[in-house]
Image: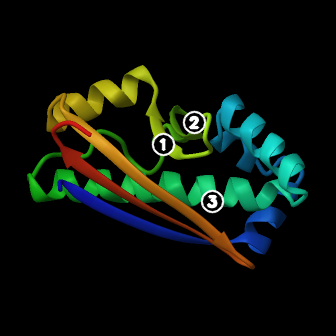
Amino acid sequence: MLGLGHDVVDVAAFAAQLGEPGGGTRRLFSPRELRQAAVRAQAKHDGEAVHLAAKWAGKEAVLKAWCEALAAASLPFPYTVDDFPWPQIEILDDSRGVPHVALAPDPQRRLSDSLGPATVWHLSLSHDGPIASAVAVLTAGSA
């Protein structure tokens, strides 16, 4: 294991941020993430916010795991808080609904440059009532 990250999101507060005009919270997600959240909300007859809150918790957990791995290796962080590419760190579901991390080319290159090409993300998302949560683990080697 190279890094571990966990995050918890208040769904109601997150929904309020999503609803703010010009708030920009939706810009933190890729079009694929937004589409998946909308489809899942429609299928489950619940709000889109709960699914986006879980994806947001996933993104935060990924960032924390990556930072832990870099800190343990005494390596510099490739991004700052101001330029972290949130929409390029996607939390997507596969055809069975299992979440996974999908990195765009630039973050994938920076991850490979910093920790080597053989890294694997493990991700778990959950939501219950007012809380969404995620755990991300970054490991070396194959899945």
Residue found at x 49% / y 37%: 85
Spatial distance from mark 1 to mark 2, Cα to Cα?
A: 7 Å
Percent position of residue 111, x then y: 27, 35
Q: Which residue is mark 1?
A: 100
In this rendering, which labeled residue sits more in front, label 1 or label 2?
A: 2
Mark 2, secondary structure of its residue: loop
Dividing the picture into quarters, in which one does residue 71 lie?
Answer: bottom left
Q: Quadrant of the N terminus?
A: bottom left
Looking at numbered disc 2 in the image, what kind of residue is underneath it?
A: Asp
**Amino acid type of the residue tagged 1 in the rendering:** His
Identify which residue is drawn at 58% across, 39% down. 92
Q: Amino acid at mark 3?
A: Ala
Residue 80 location, x and y as percent? Answer: 38, 47
Q: Nearer the viewer, residue 15 or 97?
A: 97
Q: Which residue is mark 3?
A: 54
Residue at image point 55% right, 46% down? 98
Image-quadrant location for residue 107: top left
76 or 116, which is in the foreground? 116
Name the N-terminal-most of marks 1 and 2: 2
Q: Are marks 1 and 2 in contact (CB under 8 Å)?
A: yes
